[in-house]
């Protein structure tokens, strides 16, 4: 029977020891990766292949571990196939030297050759023995370099943060303007170059009761915009250079926007304020339109020189939006930096399955008239954000959450809103021409007077949406669209399929024979007798729709419309 003992020859023992060493190193590496969370990040889920973008950052971060394992592996192979043999040969050479030294005759040449060979082999063994120390040195150097790099990045972030709060003191000319309204004294302060029209005030003997104080110099602390813009660009560069700091930089920029451009604390949309006075929903007494025109809460908001009787849903908002100030240059710069994140940077905000693990937090921000055209704002949280008059042409807002956001007068042409949640959003007068709204939730959204020409609304939720005067020409619905709007009063419907609509609000709209209707309804027959029974091209439809609006819903006519149109 064979003796089950361990191998006794040195070569076999070396091989066995090398295998044990490799197993131990593999275990140590696995524990290191497990503690860092890399293993979980690289593990495929549900059979999905891990994208290369998740592998390359791992190699950049843990290259030193790869080098050490590679060095240990090569050293082990050298130990098995060379160093072990060299040690055995050295021992044999020493034994040979002993034999030659005691043998008769002149053996000096042979002894010298054997001595040189022994010295070379011993030198090789000594050099190999330093391999482990060289590997340790590689690891120590890598740690020192990484620490220095991270310290440098931290210093750059701290310097940028200091510059983000930079202010300066400037002297500005200002004055107080004094006037009376109905005999009551009023005053208003204005800066030179920023004069604004005053509300209607008293006139005596053909002259306005108005007194202007002389211009005086006032010191004023202002944000140092030049320095702040530079700091924002510095943070953008850090986010590009250091993937591990990308999300932190985005959080800093979002917080900067929220703190320096907060949403207004009270309602200042003149359309909402005016009709809240005329048709209050809180049970308070209604104010007549003439009195509402002169009401203090509306007086300070209305577009001066315009009468509410001449205003419509669209033009009141349009007049007001045009007078809104655009974002400060530092706020616009921060928005642009956030919206131009590269594909690799956006990948850091997702897990390997493509699910967002980080959302841009712009809740409650004042982004009025911001230039967001073409920017990447997918999955952003825009709860109660103010985007009145913002340019969102071609912007990517897939999965975003502009819940109860204000989008009055915004330009959403060709914007991507697939899967977005616009619950209770205010989009009166917004232009959504060919916007992508597949799967979007517009529950209770206000879209009065919105231009919805040709949008993709497959699977969208329009439950209780307000669509007064909206242009739905060519809108694309399907059986997954929850089309149960609160109202379609005065809306225009052409070349759309509303066979799955959940109510009969479309009878308050205008359409033609191109509309696919639910059973028992037909264009030209009651209750759709006001619909033309023939197919109209878009120009004919536009003229017929506006004429009908002028007769039945003049408050929904677009800005500048005249019957001759």
Image (cartoon, rainbow, N blue to C red):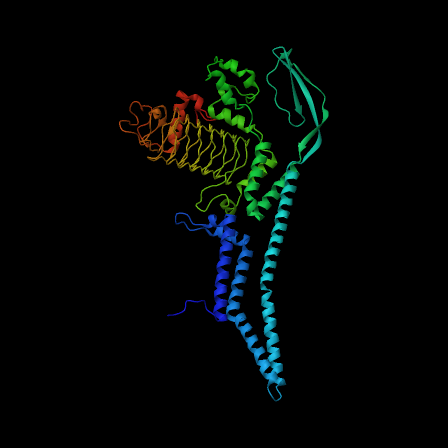
Point 60% across, 72% down: residue: 122
- Residue 367 x, y percent position in the rendering: 54, 32
Residue 55 visible to an observer of this rendering:
yes
- Residue 457 x, y percent position in the rendering: 39, 35
- Residue 144 x, y percent position in the rendering: 62, 53
Query: For this rendering, which residue is in front, 176 or 481?
Result: 481
Query: For this rendering, which residue is in front, 206 or 224?
Result: 224
As drawn, 521 above or below 87: above
Residue 337 visible to an observer of this rendering:
no
Numbered-mark total: 0
Point 59% across, 58% down: residue: 136
Q: Is residue 83 left or right of residue 148?
A: left
- Which residue in the rendered view is the most extreme toward the left? 520
- Residue 549 x, y percent position in the rendering: 40, 23
In the rendered image, the quadrant that contains the C terminus is top left
As drawn, 41 above or below 2: above
Point 55% across, 77% down: residue: 92
As drawn, 89 above or below 533: below
Query: For this rendering, which residue is in front, 48 or 273?
Result: 48
- Which residue in the rendered view is the most extreme toward the bottom? 105
Q: Quadrant of residue 65?
A: bottom right
Query: For this rendering, which residue is in front, 79 or 305?
Result: 79
């Amino acid at each position: 029977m064979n003796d089950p003992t361990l191998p006794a020859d040195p070569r076999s023992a070396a091989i066995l020891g090398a295998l044990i060493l490799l197993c131990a190193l593999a275990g140590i590496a696995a524990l290191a990766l497990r503690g860092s969370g890399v293993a979980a990040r690289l593990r495929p889920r549900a059979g999905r292949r891990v994208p290369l973008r998740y592998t390359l950052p791992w190699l950049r971060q843990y290259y030193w571990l790869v080098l050490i394992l590679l060095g240990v592996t090569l050293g082990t192979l050298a130990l098995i196939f060379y160093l072990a043999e060299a040690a055995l040969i050295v021992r044999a050479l020493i034994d040979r030297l002993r034999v030659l030294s005691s043998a008769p005759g002149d053996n000096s040449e042979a002894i010298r050759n054997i001595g040189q060979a022994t010295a070379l082999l011993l030198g090789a063994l000594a050099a190999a023995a330093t391999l482990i120390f060289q590997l340790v040195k590689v690891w120590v150097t890598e740690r020192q370099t990484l620490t220095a790099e991270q310290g440098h990045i931290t210093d750059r972030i701290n310097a940028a943060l200091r510059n983000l709060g930079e202010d300066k003191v400037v002297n500005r000319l200002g004055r107080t303007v004094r006037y009376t309204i109905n005999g009551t004294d009023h005053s208003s302060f204005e800066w030179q170059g920023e004069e604004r029209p005053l509300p209607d005030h008293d006139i005596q003997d053909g002259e306005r009761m108005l007194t202007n104080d002389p211009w005086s110099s006032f010191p004023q602390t202002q944000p140092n915009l030049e320095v702040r813009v530079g700091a924002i660009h510095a943070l953008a560069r850090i986010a590009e250079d250091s993937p591990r700091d990308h999300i932190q930089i985005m959080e800093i920029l979002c917080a900067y926007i929220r703190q320096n451009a907060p949403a207004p604390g009270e309602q200042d949309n003149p359309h909402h304020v005016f009709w809240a006075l005329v048709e209050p929903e809180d049970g308070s007494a209604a104010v007549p339109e003439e009195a509402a025109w002169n009401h203090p809460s509306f007086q300070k908001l209305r577009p001066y020189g315009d009468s509410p009787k001449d205003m419509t849903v669209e033009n009141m908002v349009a007049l007001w939006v045009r007078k809104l100030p655009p974002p400060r240059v530092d706020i616009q710069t921060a928005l642009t930096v956030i919206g131009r994140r590269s594909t690799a940077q956006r990948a850091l905000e997702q897990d390997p399955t493509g699910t967002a693990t980080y959302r841009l937090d712009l809740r409650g921000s004042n982004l009025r008239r911001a230039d967001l055209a073409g920017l990447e704002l997918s999955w952003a949280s825009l709860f109660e954000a103010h985007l009145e008059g913002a340019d969102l042409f071609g912007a990517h807002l897939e999965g975003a959450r502009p819940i109860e956001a204000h989008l009055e007068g915004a330009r959403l042409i060709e914007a991507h809103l697939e899967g977005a949640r616009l619950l209770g959003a205010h989009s009166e007068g917004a232009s959504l021409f060919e916007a992508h709204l597949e799967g979007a939730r517009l529950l209770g959204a206000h879209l009065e007077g919105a231009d919805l020409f040709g949008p993709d609304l497959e699977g969208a939720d329009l439950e209780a949406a307000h669509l007064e005067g909206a242009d739905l020409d060519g809108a694309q619905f399907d059986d997954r669209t929850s089309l149960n709007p609160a109202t379609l009063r005065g809306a225009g419907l052409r070349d759309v399929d509303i066979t799955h609509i959940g109510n009969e609000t479309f009878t308050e709209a205008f359409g033609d024979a191109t509309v696919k209707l639910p059973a028992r309804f037909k264009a030209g027959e009651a209750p759709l007798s006001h619909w033309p029974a023939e197919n109209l091209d878009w120009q004919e439809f536009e003229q017929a729709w506006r004429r009908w609006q002028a007769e039945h819903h003049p408050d929904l006519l677009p800005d500048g419309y005249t019957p001759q149109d």
